[in-house]
Image (tube, helix red, strand yellow):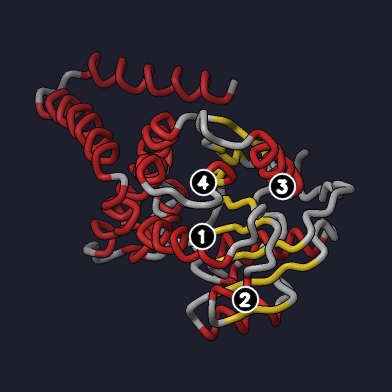
Amino acid sequence: MSGGTVCVRRVSYGTVGIVGLGLIGASIGLRLRGVGAAKRVIGFDVSPSARADAVRMGAVDASYETLNHLGDADILVLAVPPDALIPCLIEADVFCKVNSIVTDTSSVKGYVLEWLKTYPLRFGPRFVGGHPMAGNEGRGAADAKADLFEGRSWVLTPTQATDKSAYEAVHSLVLTLGAKPLTLTPEEHDRHAAILSHLPHAIAAILAQMGANLVHPEVAGASWNDLTRVAGSNPDLWANIFTTNRHEVASALEDFEFMLSELKKAVDAEQHQTLLEFFQAAARAKTAWRN
């Protein structure tokens, strides 16, 4: 699929519950209701304004201030920050139906699946880790879009303990949302996310702060604007992500620091050939990426 094409899949997921009605959660609701893929979409958020926004914009049929109201959900989507995921899983285990399928959208996977090995949840085998590689600098339901996931990768991290039918249901759900399912191990996901998502946010944050110290910010061109686009994302969320995926983020930062130090040495020494080879290697890497 490409562009703004909406793929209407002739399936029904019964009642879908969404915990967390921010950008991701509300976008999921908008898509499901927009294509009629769920009998009912219900949501929960601790924020009264988020609940109201989600109902007003049609992302959910109803929103609630307590989680237990989502007990009838056939599929439960936990669209919450990494540090809130485990508490949500514990609470959901109390109110979920026996055959409920649970998935999440968290940016970090390894720590949760390690925890699940030692914590016996009723729905444990029916939990399918997920992470949509989509988003924008928006922070809440007001920025949600039904086509947010269109054509984007959505990583799924099943384990050997994952129930096959649960995985297939979540895989189908991801397709309905317009995304492209990609199966990785939790470890593969966290390493890739650190380099392809988390590190770019760090670079954007650094550049935004450096630019803020300049007297004439109007000099900024398209490259600076492109590189700093995500610097306006939710600070609480990103501090949370960096803490939760700290080992992989630290490793990515070390690799970046080394390459940056080598670049600085070449600049200081006026090594034109080294600099030329550096940018040639980058151009080749980008070309290969496009292909």
- Image quarter of the N terminus: top right
The answer to whether residue 133 is visible is no
Residue under label 1: 93
Q: Residues within 10 Å of mark 4 (few under 14, many from 20)?
A: some
Earlier-in-chain disc, 4 versus 1 = 1
Q: Position of residue 103 (x, y in %)?
A: 57, 50
Earlier-in-chain disc, 3 versus 1 = 1
The answer to whether residue 248 is visible is yes
Q: Which mark is residue 249?
A: none
Q: Residues within 10 Å of mark 1 (few under 14, many from 20)?
A: some
- In space, the residues marked 3 and 1 are separated at their CA atoms by 21 Å
Earlier-in-chain disc, 2 versus 1 = 2
Earlier-in-chain disc, 2 versus 3 = 2
Foreground pick, 14 / 97: 97
Closer to us: mark 2 or mark 3?
Answer: 2
Q: Residues within 10 Å of mark 3 (few under 14, many from 20)?
A: many
Residue under label 2: 69
Amino acid on which the number 4 mark rests in the picture? Gly
